[in-house]
Amino acid sequence: MPLADFPRVPLAHLPTPLEHLPRLSKHLGGPGIYVKRDDCTGLATGGNKTRKLEFSMAEALQRGADTIVTVGAVQSNHVRQTAAAACKLGLKCEVLLEHRVVDPSEYYSNSGNVLLDRIFGANLREYPGGTDFDEAMSDVAAEVTANGGKPYLIPGGASNPVGALGYVNCAMELLQQLDERDLDIGHIVTATGSAGTQGGLIVGLKAMKSAIPLLGIGVNAPTEEQEQKVYELACETAEYIGKPGIVAREDVVANCDYVGEGYGIRTEGMNEAVLMLARLEGLLFDPVYSGKALAGMINLIRTGSLGSGDIVFLHTGGAAALFAYADQLHL
Ligand SMILES: *Cc1c(COP(=O)(O)O)cnc(C)c1O
């Protein structure tokens, strides 16, 4: 089924710009580096979840839902964009917030994304790390139903085949930009977490018969587990758009060497990358996802592991979380 036939509600400013980063490219002395600005999707400081939510929210509306139920970490960018989208569409938003960071600072608990969630009036419920969220989500949905509401559940990161359609579409948009500008790209690099971004992108690239390698840089799980998660979602997404079998296991490549001590925990490489991009290009990246992915890309360029072809780095957004890490960044 062509993408245009899936229900979709406009939330994002598209197409997002594709920009060359001449000062970063020169500084690293390797390939030319471009950035696909999905931090500029426009909804409540932007980010990658907005593309996914165009499809998830449309399905919610189509099903007559009046309440969105979703889940994420305290500093989830997904939750912040979902809370904003719910406001824009006149829906209620129930949020399950997971405490994934041990001993959080005052900034982490109250600033950045969670401050914005509160501004959007989302109903925040807090849970300890490691909670079974399948069960907790259905409990909240049952409560909404018992109170006469109609819930629609969006999984963490909106990473299911519906949400991943946003990144199938992004791959097509990017390929068109490369074509129009006659750019020959050696690698596309993105942060990968709940897998919808990388999974959707690989489906879009394969559907368009593109051979550009896609590298996901992990922020959470070990490599094998991350690749398997992306592969499974990519297969489901390919099937969902009526193109089963277009993604092979070896198309899914992740590098999870830059996670550090764990999800949301600062690394020296992230700190260096965030400051480098800010001070060379005036761009803001985040400590949890895009900053760690950049740290990976920078290291792989320095070691010559990405080859000499130009690189497109997908900027997935998240700068709102910088404020939550005010005491963690060494400036
Ligand atoms: C969610 C998120 C990602 C990861 O995308 P997934 O689709 O969850 O893999 C990357 N960067 C930022 C800023 C995010 O919020």
Image: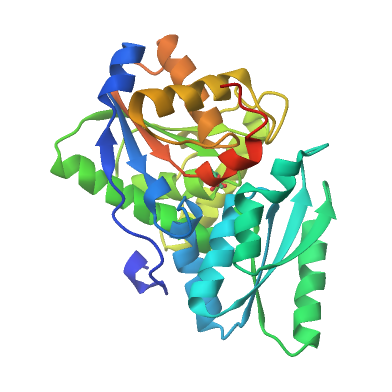
Q: Position of residue 305 (x, y in %)?
A: 43, 14
Question: Left or right: where does residue 159 sit relative to residue 103?
Answer: left
- The C terminus sits in image quarter: top right
Q: Is residue 252 above or below residue 242?
A: above
Q: Is residue 309 visible?
A: no
Q: Residue at x 29, y 21 (%)?
A: 23
Q: Residue at x 64, y 31 (%)?
A: 224
Question: Left or right: where does residue 33 sit relative to residue 323?
Answer: left
Q: Residue at x 21, y 30 (%)?
A: 184
Quadrant of the image occupied by residue 278: top left
Furthest toward the bottom, the residue is 148
- Tally of numbered discs: 0
- 25 or 209, which lies in front? 25
Displayed-image quarter of ligand 1: top right
Q: How is the image coloured?
A: rainbow
Q: Residue at x 58, y 58 (%)?
A: 80
Q: Is residue 71 above or below residue 285?
A: below
- 287 or 3, which lies in front? 287
- The N terminus sits in image quarter: bottom left
Q: Is residue 196 above or below residue 259?
A: below
Question: Left or right: where does residue 105 sit relative to residue 246?
Answer: right
Quadrant of the image occupied by residue 148: bottom right
Q: Position of residue 125 (x, y in %)?
A: 78, 63
Quadrant of the image occupied by residue 212: top left
Q: Is residue 48 visible?
A: yes
Q: Is residue 325 above or below residue 244?
A: above
Q: Position of residue 172 (x, y in %)?
A: 30, 51
- 5 or 47, which lies in front? 47
